[in-house]
Amino acid sequence: MLTLPVYAAGAVATSGGGPKSLRVDGKTSGGEAALATPVPRVLLTVHRRRAPSAPEPTLSLPHYTAAVMLLHGLSGPRGIHASQASTANYRAIFSRDGVMAGIAGLLLGDAVITAGLVRTLEGLRDTQGPEGQVASNFELRDGAAPQVSFGSLAPRIDGATWYLLGVALAARQGAIAPPQFEASVRAAVRVLDALEYNGRHLVYIPTGGNWADEYIYDGYILYDQVLRAWALRLLGATFGEPAWVEKSAHIAMRIDEAFWPDVRNATCHPVASFSPVGRRHIFDLAACSLLALSDLAPAMGDAALDWITATFLDAGALPPAFHPVITPGDPDWDALSRYHLHGFRNRPHEYHNGGIWPIWLGWLSLALAQRGRDAALRTLTELTAAQLTRTPSYGFEEYFHGATGESLGTPQMAYSATGVVFMSHATDDAARALFAA
């Protein structure tokens, strides 16, 4: 049996379960002995069972119950693991995977998954780098030093932004006591401010610096700017920092100024990135979905949803992670085919290169629901349900082939289970409240 305290906003947590110290800017702060007794708002009790029953979804999708069971299985005492597979380092706790899965737990009101989110956030806090860097992933092993990665070929900047968003949403739901994370949050905010460097409100992201770690875009990437601005807006309210809310507004203004395509109309998508050498007029589903859901630049978000609906949903197709597909002979093919970590995976319609990722379909469904796009959401749900029905042995692989629909990539992924849960509960009141501006 697990009993999880859910804290009221602004409540202070006990020192018993927290870290003994925090590393910030290379210095170690004292312990938490001075912190007061926790003020729980409610105690959620969950009996662990071999086959936990899932809450009734508002929108029914195949494999929904299995998705919730997988997230239960991946939620452990050290956080939410990326996968049950032993491929590469997927048994580690990844910032973006764990936070997204934990957000699914917040939507479900599920104590086991929410507890996994809390452990994930605590692990990211406690393994934070001396300058405020947040790990891309970490592994805690009994009797051994933690294995912490901030990126391999390039720094993973979205480790910090997903951590900040996770803290903000967990605090909004009362799942954590914000004071336990304040020093860490301030350090992460500062490191992102430092990476901005020129005071123009956007952070320059290297190739491989976010979730699309084998895709060839870089520079001022929209996805990363949206996450930073959204997190700052929420955290400004959490910690009473109007300067963070103001900074979020400045970033949103820059997004609206800089990311419209060269030919702007009512149905178009923003550019995925730009740099001193050019603008990438590719479609980035993650960026567009998060932009529309966060309501940072409403006109741009609505135009993107209109474009997705007209280009894919109305044509009976699920949108891929990136579009168009890069094929042999295209100018970008040589660079794409050379850049990989664990063997080349970006063949046409596969992986980042036109693969269809359930996690980003889930975020899209939340955006459509939040923006009142009921017809488009119904179409997306029907198309996804049909795809899942055609895959009766679906093992929550990372993505579907963009042309054949075959499920590919690492199986038993928290990422994919989270996408199914998001779509199943997109219209719930809990989702509308959690993501309200």
Image (cartoon, grey):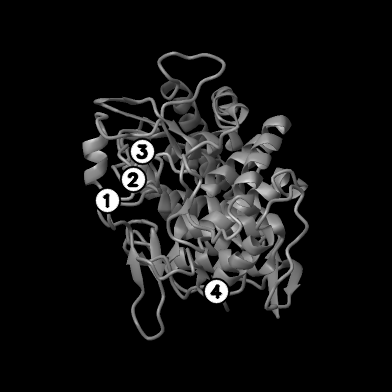
What type is the residue that disc 3 sits on? Answer: Val
Q: Which residue is mark 1?
A: 340
Pointer 1 with pointer 4, Cβ within 8 A: no
Gap between marks 1 and 2 measured at Cα: 8 Å
Which of these two is toward me, 395 or 82? 395
In the image, taking residue 153 as reference, residue 393 lies left or right, namely right
In the image, residue 98 lies at what x, y percent? Answer: 51, 60
What type is the residue that disc 4 sits on? Answer: Gly
What type is the residue that disc 2 sits on? Answer: Asn
Of the image marks 1 and 3, the number of the one nearer the N terminus: 3
- Few, some or many C-alpha atoms within 10 Å of disc 2 (few <14, some 14-19, many ≥20)? many
**Residue at 40% across, 33% down:** 201
Q: Which residue is mark 2?
A: 346
**Which mark is nearer the camera, 1 or 2?**
2
Q: Is residue 12 visible?
A: no
Pointer 1 with pointer 2, Cβ within 8 A: yes
- Few, some or many C-alpha atoms within 10 Å of disc 3 (few <14, some 14-19, many ≥20)? many
**Which mark is nearer the camera, 3 or 4?**
4
Q: Specify the label residue 203 is tagged with.
A: 3
Which of these two is toward me, 169 or 92? 92
Q: Which residue is mark 4?
A: 76
Relative to 326, residue 119 above or below? below
Q: Is residue 192 visible?
A: yes
SS under mark 4: strand
Gap between marks 3 and 2 measured at Cα: 26 Å
